[in-house]
Image (cartoon, rainbow, N blue to C red):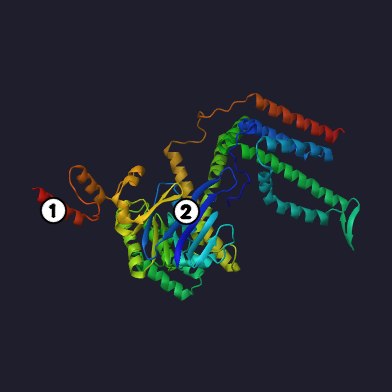
Amino acid sequence: MSIEFNKVGYIYSEKTPFEYAALHDVDLKFSEGKVTAIIGATGSGKSTLVQHLNALLLPSSGKLNILNFEIVAKQKATNLKALRSHVGLVFQFPEYQLFEETILKDLCFGPKNFGATEEEAQEKAIRALKLVGLDQSYLEKSPLDLSGGQKRRVAIAGILAMDPDVLVLDEPTAGLDPQGAIAMMSLFKELNQKFGKTVLVVTHDMEHVLNYCDEVVVMKKGEVYSHTTVHEFFKDTTYLDELHILPPSVVRFRQMLNERGFHLPNDCYDMKTLCALIAKEVKNHG
Amino acid sequence: MGNFVLGKYLPYDSVIHKMDPRAKILAMLMVLVSIFLPAGYLGYAVLALVIVSTVLLAKLSLKFVWKSMKPMLFMLAFLMVINIFAVKTGYVLIAFGSFEIYSDAVFNTLYIAVRLMLMIMVTTCLTATTKPLDLTLGIEDLLKPFKKIGVPAHEIAMMISIALRFIPTLIEETERIMKAQASRGVDLQEGKLNEKIMAVLSLIVPLFVSAFQRAEDLANAMEARGYAPGQKRTRYKQLKFCFRDFVLLAGSLLLVVVIALMAFVL
């Protein structure tokens, strides 16, 4: 059981004037039972990478091992539906996938497609709705009448209802208010810790990377630029500076203090520890 | 869906690409007229020669043209069947007992097939070498003379350009929704009939929702910028006829005349 990319390449519109190579020889092994962030500039191949995970895109070259499934380029892949029941993929702005008359029906759609009976599906739907923080009074409402943030939650619940082992999310917090975003990320962390789900999340928010993720994969121009633990990643912010992405506030604060003469170690990642360290240094100095 | 090539613009750099859209539209109309003149085998040979060389001149591959014809193959097959049953003139070509296939049936079908193929090639030549926006500018200009009899030239052009503008967007949207539903276990290829209906529904409902949403956003955006139909406005891009456009027009006029002579005089 693992998720492994083996020299995977992907080319869009092969052999046309629009040909575009989005991935080059990607070698990557995602750690199971962890929350991994995938970051990179727009056009770096994040979304393409992510769509390989449940075989919506099939590699143009190389080999993919996902759980017990093997996908080899230029070979007809079989059993994709089974793979998709194990890997849940939430797209960017997933609210457009809602289509049923009631939220309950929409949530049941996924599980039923994968062979659940009506009762099982309903049970799963109700559980998923609770997970995303909406109560049962929503079940009979139309998903199209909800607010943007609620639609997002229902759409994500639609994937959670399928109860996949691996949860892949492409910018799940884009366009959400800060509170909603935090609630969303905490939910993914909780799913990871309580139920042992492997979570892969594409994000641009470094605070989320620091607070909710274990590992970071950096994509650059269709290649894996680095794959490290979160703490290792924020020790050196050269790459983030290159991308004009601000590091998390804690890291920035520490850097700014160090620039002005402090000698704080670069392996503290929360405000409390940082405050204690500052206090200590000030005391020693004074 | 990405293989859908009918009417797709291909950004190559060729003489045909550089020509004025108005000249290209007029030339296309003339060639279409000559395709419909009954000029016999020789006429079609001449036309095919001219059209294929135009395709090659536009740096389009014959494979691309062939691809854009594929959707028509079904229609051709259908016509063939109807012709074989309906046309009972000429001499008997093949007979299976009491069922006979007449020579005219086969020839008629062949004629239609050749005509359709040539037509698709010509129109592909136009749409693959002209940016959609240029095409609508051309249509607007060509419709201008009809304004006097109440044809809303600008509005028609605007409608066409909006429609053309949104074709790729809607195709993209469809792909996106298909993928999203595929990860929820929708399988458009396999499954029982009611599952298939559900699958199509899961595609169409979101597509309509987003199409209406887009239409509303666009209408608001246009109004916010003070768009009013019928207003006199200037253009950023000015179309200009130059020598090669006149050559194209003269060439296609000559073609019509030659084909007409072959059809009615010889």
Secondary structure state at the residue bearing disc 1: helix
Instruction: Say few, some or many: other residues with alpha carbon within 10 Å of mark 1 (under 14 / 14 to 19 / 20 or more).
Output: few
Mark 1 belongs to chain:
A
* Residue occupying image coordinates x 52% and y 50%: B172
Marks 1 and 2 in Cβ contact (< 8 Å) = no
Residue A281 horizontal/vertical position (percent): 14, 50
Pick out the residue farthest to the left.
Answer: A286
Q: Which residue is mark 1?
A: A280
Find numbered disc 2 in the image and state the secondary structure of the residue it sits on. Answer: strand
The x and y percentages for residue A80 are 53, 64
Mark sitting on residue A232: none
Work out which residue is located at the far right of the displayed protein and give it.
B91
**In the displayed structure image, the side of residue A180 where residue A24 appears, left or right:** right
- Please give the label number shown on residue A26: 2
Which residue appears at 12% of the width and 49% of the height? Answer: A282
Chain where mark 2 sits: A
State the image coordinates of residue A224 (x, y, percent, origin top left): 43, 51
N-terminal of the two: label 1 or label 2?
Answer: 2
Is residue A197 visible from the viewing direction of this image?
yes
Amino acid at circle 2: Val
Between the C-alphas of marks 1 and 2, the distance is 45 Å
Q: Where is residue B190, by image quadrant?
A: bottom right
In the rendered view, would you say B243 is above or below A179? above
Where residue B239 sits, quadrant-wise, is top right
User: For the residue carrying disc 2, how many other residues have a C-alpha within 10 Å: few (<14), some (14-19), or many (20+)?
Assistant: many
The percent coordinates of residue B130 (x first, y second) are 60, 36
